[in-house]
Image: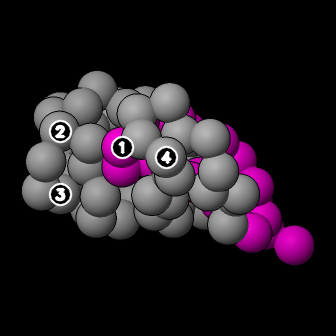
Amino acid sequence: MANYWWICQRCKTCIQKSAMPNNANCPASGAHRWNRAAEVGDHAFQCSKCQQLIHAKMTPSTGGCASGGGHAWQRL
């Protein structure tokens, strides 16, 4: 089963997991707001807005940037 990057739109927590993480106990609000960014891989990507850094197989999803709007991913 593939692992994916999950990023909380509220607190910027980023974890690897095959299924959506539990949404309880977000430090920024009552519940996490998870967005599945991409499948874990070898290519480094960084969002120029929120500075989140992940390693993915392909360009991550733009949805759910904690800095507002969508992520602006740059391949490093």
Per the model, the C-alpha gap separating discs 2 and 3 is: 8 Å
Residue 40 visible here: no
Per the model, the C-alpha gap separating discs 1 and 3 is: 13 Å
Q: Which mark is residue 30?
A: 4
Q: Residue at x 77, y 65 (%)?
A: 18
Image coordinates for residue 22, horizontal then vertical, percent: 71, 57
Which residue is under mark 3? 70
Q: Quadrant of the C terminus?
A: top left
Q: Is residue 54 magenta?
A: no
Per the model, the C-alpha gap separating discs 2 and 4 is: 19 Å
Which residue is under mark 1? 10
Q: Which residues are magenta?
A: 1-19
Which residue is under mark 2? 67
Image coordinates for residue 37, horizontal then vertical, percent: 46, 59
Q: Amino acid at mark 2?
A: Ser
67 left or right, relative to 29: left
Mark 1 or mark 3: which comes first in sequence? 1
Q: Is residue 2 magenta?
A: yes
Q: Nearer the viewer, residue 31 or 74?
A: 31
